[in-house]
């Protein structure tokens, strides 16, 4: 009885002491203990209360935890309110059960400095057992978690990146044998955020052997992601066997969310297996659609280096060519039938109504420096209704702000175009070089579905060497300097097309009566050279057995204007001809072709009417129908271009004709005489401007 009485007195006295104890006096002890363990100061500026019972409650407010000394932000953690309930009965079952946890007005800052030090690494961390368990079996059971008006900020001075998550309201529930659920709303990178999670029970979570099942649905802005599968180590995000299903309006909008650089794309949806090992994430294999194109392959991202490194191997069975517009700053899918994101539609409408061809959307240089990349894209078939493009194999590299195509090889018109391009975003202004090599392109396919195409064929080869500066594709072309040449030797072209070029009425009528027989092509050469967007014609010649067409003028890349004059010179007599200079002018988007007999221009309607009158008046006295057309020395022309193709990768297989193919009878001798005369004069033509370089 005495022992019982003494124990009863002790228990009652202890209960009275605990109930009446001022827990604020314990704040100093708690702060000192935390500071000693972490090397950082902890302050509880508000009240600290403990309500004891079988379900005890701890209440604290105005908490501050000091940041690392190198940080410009004084506090790593600030919490307005924390309420935690603890079920003491469950401690007898060796379980930590928290019926409710409420956190409000919290602000946590996680950051790394330029030297790679993290503020969550404490100098005495080895002596500390942190509040977050390291093993699944130690994880407490939180039956209800509420987070209100809280912010998480991550800043990395190494990569100059900053991510911000704001939770307006988050609520999670879970029990020992019931699923854990989480719903949250807020903003991420200033974009609306919605999150829902459904996982296994706490019994699953605390099991050391069972994989933990979960399904996460995430929405950020217009990006929607769904992750479903299992995690072997959920607290460490290891051993996952999950599927990621992601969709959005533009892959370029993923950059603020995952700090990976993608070109602007039409709406997309991709699905595949997501894996994680150490600092390497992989999305492999995946498949889906981007705009009108199917896409599959593998993506691997190593987050260990200072700049993340992405390696991707992408394959498309059918690639819509319009979906590649984002690579040059244009809006993808803007052509008829293309898929365009809602936020892209205003820009797409502007581009459609713009009288300029080259896009002026500025390149985002900050993004080019955010990561390195090595990407390969293979397209087995390309959908391009107005272009003879068949296949694509592109190798792209990005290193320290320098973007390269090494190369991008297009299968075009039964030949190929190899594009070697460098965009140096590490300099100001950005430097861009383009080296495009045209190899064995078929004239027939280049002419499209026109009636002339059926009567034409021949191999076209050439090279485009340009360099410029600018922050958009339009600025690049406005400053472009370099040379361009296109060569064709052999083949045939529509006879009707040649006669129409010379305004030969009689011959045109004859072709219409007897049929459009192809005319052999001896050679065709276009050679341009210029600086600062002004490209002048060095040589422009099309030599057939029927007619020689010379050209002169310039091409203005700055204002996107054409100003060319074509001079057709026939090699035979025609009793009825309206021979005239032909002016090719207008903008790149709206090309105009019109006779200009005395080179007065064709810009106004009045000028065009006057030109038609002059053609009719002067046509009867045109001297160019009197066999003045002569064969061009094609071999000399093409050989001269070898200097602009030093490695011989373009012109190595060109076969140049030594003279024109003869026709018959007297014309054969006359043609031979004219050919010899042409070689002596290098293609000079009486009554016409001398062909430069010819």
Image (cartoon, rainbow, N blue to C red):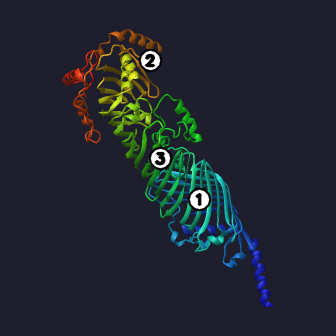
Quickly name the residue at label 3: 367
- Mark nearer the viewer, 2 or 1: 2
| 295 over 535 or under it: above or below | below
| 615 over 555 or under it: above or below | above
Give the distance between the C-alpha atoms of the residues marked 3 and 2, in whole angstroms.
Answer: 44 Å
Tell me the crowding category of disc 3: few under 14, some 14 to 19, or many 20 or more residues within 10 angstroms, Cα based: some
Q: Nearer the viewer, residue 653 or 418?
A: 653
> In x, y percent, where is residue 197?
64, 60
Query: Residue visible at 40% across and 32% down?
Result: 454
Give the distance between the C-alpha atoms of the residues marked 2 and 1, in whole angstroms.
Answer: 61 Å
Q: Nearer the viewer, residue 75 or 536?
A: 536
SS under mark 2: loop
- Mark nearer the viewer, 3 or 1: 1
Q: Is residue 58 left or right of residue 122?
A: right
| 362 over 240 or under it: above or below | above
Q: Is residue 234 left or right of residue 182?
A: left
Query: Residue visible at 63% across and 68% down?
Result: 30
Q: Is residue 490 left or right of residue 244?
A: left
> In x, y percent, where is residue 379?
44, 48
Quickly name the residue at label 2: 603
Tell me the crowding category of disc 1: few under 14, some 14 to 19, or many 20 or more residues within 10 angstroms, Cα based: many
SS under mark 3: helix
Tell me the crowding category of disc 2: few under 14, some 14 to 19, or many 20 or more residues within 10 angstroms, Cα based: few
Pointer 2 or 1: first along the chain: 1
Quickly name the residue at label 1: 227
């Amino acid at each position: 009885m005495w022992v019982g009485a003494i124990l009863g007195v002790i228990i009652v006295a202890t209960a009275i002491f605990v109930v009446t104890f001022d827990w604020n006096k314990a704040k100093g002890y708690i702060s000192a203990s935390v500071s000693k363990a972490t090397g950082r100061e902890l302050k509880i500026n508000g009240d600290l209360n403990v309500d004891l019972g079988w379900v005890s409650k701890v209440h604290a407010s105005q908490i501050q935890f000091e940041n690392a000394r190198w940080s410009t932000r004084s506090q790593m953690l600030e919490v307005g309110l924390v309420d935690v309930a603890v079920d003491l009965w469950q401690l007898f079952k060796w379980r930590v059960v928290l019926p409710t946890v409420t956190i409000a007005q919290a602000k946590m800052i996680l950051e790394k400095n330029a030297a790679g030090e993290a503020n969550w690494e404490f100098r005495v961390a080895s002596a500390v057992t942190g509040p977050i368990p390291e093993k699944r079996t130690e994880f407490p059971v939180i039956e209800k978690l509420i987070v209100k008006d809280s912010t998480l900020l991550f800043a990395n001075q190494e990569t100059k990146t900053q991510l911000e998550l704001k939770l307006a309201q988050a609520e999670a529930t879970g029990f020992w044998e019931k699923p854990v659920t989480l719903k949250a709303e807020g903003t991420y990178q200033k974009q609306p955020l919605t999150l829902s999670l459904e996982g296994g029970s706490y019994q699953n979570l605390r099991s050391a052997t069972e994989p933990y099942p979960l399904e996460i649905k995430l929405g950020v802005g217009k990006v929607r992601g769904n992750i479903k599968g299992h995690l072997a180590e959920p607290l460490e995000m290891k051993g996952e066997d999950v599927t990621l299903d992601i969709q959005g309006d533009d892959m370029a909008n993923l950059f603020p969310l995952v700090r990976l650089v993608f070109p602007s794309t039409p709406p997309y949806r991709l699905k595949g297996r997501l894996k994680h090992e150490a600092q390497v994430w992989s999305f492999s294999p995946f498949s889906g659609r981007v705009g009108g194109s199917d896409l599959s392959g593998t993506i691997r991202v190593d987050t260990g280096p200072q700049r993340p490194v992405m390696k991707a191997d992408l394959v498309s069975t059918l690639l819509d060519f319009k979906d590649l517009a984002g690579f040059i700053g244009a809006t993808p899918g803007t052509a008829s039938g293309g898929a365009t994101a809602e936020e892209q539609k205003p820009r797409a409408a502007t581009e459609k109504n713009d009288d300029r061809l080259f896009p002026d959307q500025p390149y985002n240089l900050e993004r080019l420096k955010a990561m390195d990349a090595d990407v390969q894209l293979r397209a087995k078939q390309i959908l391009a209704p107005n272009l003879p493009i068949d296949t694509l194999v592109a190798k792209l590299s990005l290193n320290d702000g320098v973007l390269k195509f090494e190369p991008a090889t297009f299968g075009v018109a039964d030949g190929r175009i190899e594009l070697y391009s460098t965009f140096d975003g590490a300099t100001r202004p950005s430097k861009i070089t383009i080296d495009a090599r045209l190899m064995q392109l078929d004239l027939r396919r280049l002419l499209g579905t026109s009636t002339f195409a059926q009567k034409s064929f021949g191999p076209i080869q050439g090279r485009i060497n340009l360099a410029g500066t600018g922050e958009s594709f339009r600025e690049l072309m406005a400053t472009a300097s370099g040379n361009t040449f296109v060569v064709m030797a052999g083949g045939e072209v529509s006879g009707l097309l040649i006669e129409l070029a010379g305004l030969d009425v009689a011959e045109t009528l004859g072709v219409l009566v007897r049929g459009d027989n192809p005319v052999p092509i001896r050679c065709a050469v276009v050679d341009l050279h210029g600086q600062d967007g002004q490209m002048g014609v060095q040589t422009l010649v099309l030599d057939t057995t029927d007619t020689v067409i010379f050209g002169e003028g310039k091409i203005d890349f700055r204002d996107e204007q054409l100003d060319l004059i074509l001079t057709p010179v026939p090699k035979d007599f025609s009793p009825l001809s309206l021979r005239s200079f032909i002016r090719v002018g207008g903008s790149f988007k709206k090309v105009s072709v019109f006779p200009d007999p005395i080179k007065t221009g064709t810009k106004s309607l009045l000028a065009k009417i006057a030109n038609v009158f002059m053609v009719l008046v002067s046509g009867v006295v045109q001297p160019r129908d009197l066999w003045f057309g002569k064969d061009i020395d094609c071999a000399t022309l093409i050989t001269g271009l070898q200097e602009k193709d030093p490695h011989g990768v373009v012109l190595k297989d060109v076969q140049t004709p030594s003279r024109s193919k003869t026709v018959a009878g007297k014309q054969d001798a006359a043609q031979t005489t004219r050919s010899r005369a042409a070689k002596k004069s290098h293609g000079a033509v009486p009554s016409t401007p001398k062909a430069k370089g010819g």
